């Protein structure tokens, strides 16, 4: 069964600090992995997308890494801002599965001043 | 480009009434997906549609829920005889034509802002 597990479930950090969110998946055969940011009361917005050949991808202060061998991904947020407070969702798609995606449960990040 | 438009943003229904949620995909997108998000939980897949076709409805409850994406007009998620447990945020996403061979572009999903259903 395809699954995506994220940790931690929730995280509180102080403004300006860095943090790393984890994603483990069992989706096979792997096609690509996305990180989404979902602000409270809003729809998810894509941050990054990586295929199996990509190890790292950055989007501003967000850097995602992918280890296709261990089936792990991380999202590193640098110099956090209050606006980073949101849920971060890891989404994995399987090869030849069209647009069928497996969603992780998300990590709720709260950045405090 | 107005993005994925969902309406209503908020809907209140009494138990036993019907709820209709509408989703207009992005211009040029022919695939629509519906997801449900219960409070404090992650997104759960419900149904995947193309114009006039249901591709995958494996996440849809067997009763009271239906979805359509007609040739003209928005996609509609219909919930009949709503119960309190149906209270949730319902998100619609759209994508362009599916690619092949695991192309990352095949999975470009753009989400709407969601419709929040409250059943009294």
Image: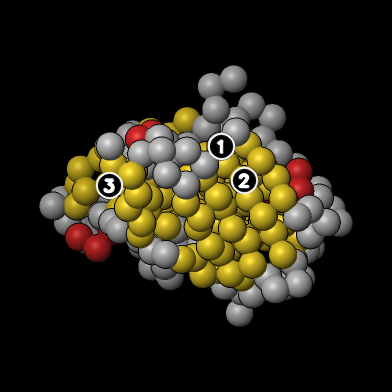
Viewed as shown, does residue B47 lie left or right of A10?
A: right
Q: Mark 1 — residue?
A: A61
Q: Quadrant of residue A53?
A: bottom right
- Farthest residue, direction right: B101
x 47%, y 47%: residue: A18
State the image coordinates of residue A37 (x, y, percent, origin top left): 48, 44
* Helix, strand or loop under label 1: loop
Image mark 1: chain: A
The foreground one among A98 and B20 is A98
Both marks 3 and 1 on one chain: no
Q: Chain of mark 2?
A: A
| Discs 2 and 1 share one subunit | yes
Residue B110 visible, this angle: no
> What residue appears at the point 69 percent right and 30 percent down from the top-left corner?
B28
Contact, CB < 8 Å: mark 3 with mark 1? no
Residue that mark 2 sits on: A63
Image x and y of residue A72, in percent: 64, 67
Q: Position of residue B15 (x, y in %)?
A: 17, 56
**Chain identity of mark 3:** B
Q: CA distance from mark 2 to mark 1?
A: 7 Å
- Residue A48 in view: yes
Residue appearing at x 66%, y 41% in the figure: A58
Q: Quadrant of the N terminus of chain A?
A: bottom right
The residue that label 3 is drawn on is B117
Residue at 51% from the left image edge and 55% from the top image edge: A20
Cα–Cα span, label 3 and label 1: 34 Å
B102, above or below B1, in the image = below
Q: The C terminus of chain A lies in which quarter of the figure? A: top left
Q: Is residue A53 rendered to the left or right of residue A63?
A: right
Judged left or right of residue A29, residue A23 is left
- Circle 2 residues within 10 Å: few <14, some 14–19, many ≥20: some
């Amino acid at each position: 069964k395809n699954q995506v597990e994220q940790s931690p479930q929730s995280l509180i950090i102080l403004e300006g600090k860095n943090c790393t969110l984890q994603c483990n998946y069992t989706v096979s055969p792997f096609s690509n992995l996305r990180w989404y940011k979902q602000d409270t009361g809003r729809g998810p917005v894509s941050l990054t997308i990586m295929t199996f050949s990509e190890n790292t991808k950055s989007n501003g202060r967000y850097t995602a890494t992918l280890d296709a061998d261990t089936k792990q991904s991380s999202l590193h947020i640098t110099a956090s801002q209050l606006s980073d407070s949101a849920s971060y969702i890891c989404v994995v798609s399987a090869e030849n599965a069209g647009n069928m995606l497996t969603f992780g449960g998300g990590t709720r990040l709260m950045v405090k001043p | 480009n107005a993005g994925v438009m969902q309406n209503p943003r908020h809907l209140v229904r009494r138990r036993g009434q019907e709820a209709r949620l509408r989703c207009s995909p992005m211009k040029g997108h022919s695939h629509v997906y519906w997801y449900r998000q219960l409070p404090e939980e992650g997104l759960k897949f419900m149904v995947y549609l193309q114009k006039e076709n249901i591709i995958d409805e494996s996440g849809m409850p067997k009763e009271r829920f239906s979805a359509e994406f007609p040739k003209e007009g928005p996609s509609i998620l219909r919930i009949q005889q709503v119960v309190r447990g149906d209270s949730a945020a319902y998100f619609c996403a759209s994508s362009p034509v599916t690619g092949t061979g695991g192309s990352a572009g095949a999975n470009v999903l753009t989400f709407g802002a969601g419709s929040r259903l409250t059943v009294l």
